[in-house]
Amino acid sequence: MPQQIKEFHNTKEGFIIKGWTSSVSKTMQHYKVCLTPLRFGAGLKGKIIDAMVNGTPVVTTHIGAEGIANTNEFCGKIANRGEELVSASVTLYAQEEQWQQAQRNGFNTIKNRFLKQHFIQEFYSKIKEIQKNLSQHRNSNFIGQILQHNTLQSTKYLSKWIEEKNKNR
């Protein structure tokens, strides 16, 4: 692990850096609370999804909880300031009933919002619809056209350079 991460290791304060893990699931299942005090990020946060799948309640910020569940159904506690995060972590760790409810909320969120079975039919329907109208889909996808154009252009000058280089041999 990088040296700057190793420097956070402080056994006297109880902040222990153990290093990389070979299995997220095995590691998550050995701990009672997952702390993810995220200040920025986009989309669903994989570490929170991993925690829910493995039954580990989470303490995070509103940024971390975005798109996962509303506050009442969240798989743990949401707090944004340092003191709130510490208090929420201690409460969730110490209050067995709240911990169990957070764990249930996580399992329910995975079951109700993220199972493949909920989306597979719609996904296949969308793919079939696009296949039937592929040229129309491509024509209406302006960003895709730009990316396609730039992808092809990226090799244009390299190939010209190779041609010139080979002429001089």
Image: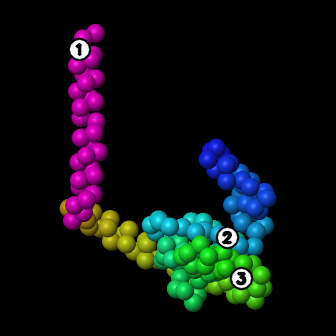
Q: Tell me the magenta residue range.
A: 140-169
Q: Which label sits on residue 167?
A: 1
* Residue closest to the eye, 91 or 67: 91
Q: Please tell me which residue lies in front, 31 or 16.
A: 16
How far apart marks 3 and 1 lie (CA) works out to: 73 Å
Residue at image mark 2: 34
Q: Which circle, 2 or 3, is nearer the viewer?
A: 3
Q: Residue at x 24, y 11 (%)?
A: 168
Q: Position of residue 119 (x, y in %)?
A: 48, 76
Marks 2 & 3, CB-CB < 8 Å contact: no
Name the residue that disc number 3 marks. Answer: 91
Is residue 125 toward the left or the right of residue 5 in the image? left
Q: Give SS at disc 1.
A: helix
Up-down relation of residue 108 to residue 27 (above or below)? below
Q: Earlier in the sequence, mark 2 or mark 1?
A: 2
The amino acid at mark 1 is: Lys
Rate crowding at label 3 as few (under 14), some (14 to 19) or many (20 or more) other CA atoms within 10 Å: some
Q: Which structural element holds mark 3? A: helix
